[in-house]
Amino acid sequence: MAGKSNDKFYKTVVFAEDMTDAMLEKALSTARDAFQLQVTAEKTFSTIAEFVRRNMEKEYGRGWNCVVGSSFGAYVTHEIKTYVYFSVAAGVSVLVWRT
């Protein structure tokens, strides 16, 4: 039951993507899981990014990158069908891509 209430707290908004549907769902669900980790305030974004990156590598192989934050700019080169930029929690964006 706790998971259902947490699902209502997180509102996923995809801003840009170039991924298969299965890969996109994996990235989004992994990020939602990462936001529920128990971490210290100083390490929140880096811990979430590491969790997402490791899970994507576990599922799809090496070469994944992830940036999480409330304010960042990025210009990245990515493999075809391996890019997504989205938000899971208000004011926090996630960028995931594979090189």
Image (spheres, grey):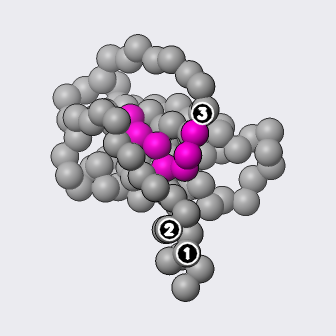
Q: Position of residue 77 (x, y in %)?
A: 32, 17
Q: Residue, x 80% and y 49% (percent of image)?
A: 40
Look at discs 2 and 3 and give the one toward the viewer. 2
Q: Position of residue 15 (x, y in %)?
A: 34, 35
**Is the residue 68 above or below the residue 58 in the image?**
above
Reading the chain from its start, which is encountered first: label 3 or label 1? 1
Q: Mark 2 touching mark 1, by CB under 8 A?
A: yes
- Say if the magenta span includes residue 90: yes
**What segment is highlighted magenta in the picture?**
85-91
Closest to the observer: 94 or 82? 94
Q: Residues within 10 Å of mark 1 (few under 14, many from 20)?
A: few
Query: Does the image show residue 38?
Result: yes
Q: Amino acid at mark 1?
A: Ser
Q: Which mark is residue 69?
A: 3
Give the side of residue 74 with respect to residue 16, left or right: right
Query: Does the image show residue 62?
Result: no
Q: Position of residue 25 (x, y in %)?
A: 31, 56
Give the side of residue 74 with respect to residue 84, left or right: right
Q: Amino acid at mark 2?
A: Lys
Main SS of the magenta part reads strand
Q: Amino acid at mark 3?
A: Gly
Q: Mark 2 touching mark 3, by CB under 8 A?
A: no
Q: Residue, x 50% and y 77% (percent of image)?
A: 4
For label 2, the residue is 8
For label 1, the residue is 5
